[in-house]
Amino acid sequence: DTNGVSDVFIRDLREGTVRRVMGQQGQEPNGGSYLPVISGNGQWVAYTSSATNLVAVPLNSPVDIFVTELATGNTWRVTQSPAGAALDSPDSSIVGMDFEGNLFWSSRATNAADNCDADGSEPDGFMWSHVDHTSTMVTFNGGSQGNAYGESFLPPVHNCADPMNPGAESGAR
């Protein structure tokens, strides 16, 4: 580790190994990475970073949110429009990640998802899918943005799947 900035490390308790989340083609990240969250199944990690070499096309945002699939090392930028453009607001935060690797995040951006009806006045909640690598706005109700209190951030994220039995069905608790 010679890049002189904060990095994200993953410790595999079964294998007894520690590894660093790297940039594309195994490059050392050229900017700080921090605030990581890992999926309950241990297959995905999300984090914020100012590095510009984590994905092939940097968008020059001050800080972006990224998700890395640990088995493959593939990394996706979450904080981008569906067309791959920079968000119109740099104000985005990680909220949490569920057991399967879906990321919940908030932003004031009005172009973060196809169904985005946000006006940018308050943060809205989004879910990034680990299946199709896209974000969907999740804090709208009947077409009106936000919730009854005017803000949507830091909601609790729960997944009721049994972490000791990953194949078990999710159920209410």
Image: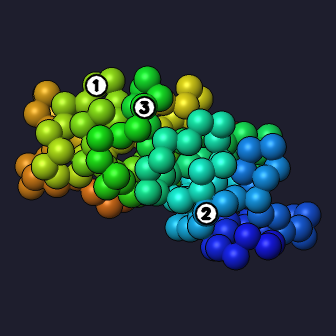
Please name the colour scheme applied to the rendered image. Answer: rainbow
Disc 2 from disc 3: Cα separation: 20 Å
Few, some or many residues within 10 Å of mark 2 (<14, 14–19, 20+): some
In depth, the one of 29 and 110 nearer the eye is 29
Few, some or many residues within 10 Å of mark 1 (<14, 14–19, 20+): some
Return the residue found at the far front.
60
The vertical placement of 6 against 14, above or below, is below
Q: Are marks 3 and 1 in contact (CB under 8 Å)?
A: no
Which residue corresponds to mark 2? 31
Measured as percent of width and height from the top left, residue 6 is found at 63, 73
Which residue type carries mark 3? Ala
The vertical placement of 32 against 91, above or below, is below
Q: Quadrant of residue 144?
A: top left
Measured as percent of width and height from the top left, residue 70 is found at 75, 48
Report the disc number at residue 115: 1
Which residue type carries mark 2? Gly
Disc 2 from disc 1: Cα separation: 32 Å
Position of 3 with respect to 106 (left or right) is right
Report the disc number at residue 143: none
Q: Does any portion of residue 99 appear in the rendered image?
A: no
Q: Does any portion of residue 3 appear in the rendered image?
A: yes
Residue at x 29%, y 41% (from the top left corner): 88
Measured as percent of width and height from the top left, residue 167 is found at 70, 40
Q: Earlier in the sequence, mark 3 or mark 1?
A: 3
Report the disc number at residue 85: 3
The N terminus, quarter of image = bottom right
Which residue type carries mark 1? Asn
Position of 131 with respect to 83 (left or right) is right
The C terminus, quarter of image = bottom left
In depth, the one of 39 and 52 nearer the eye is 52
| Residue at disc 2, secondary structure | loop
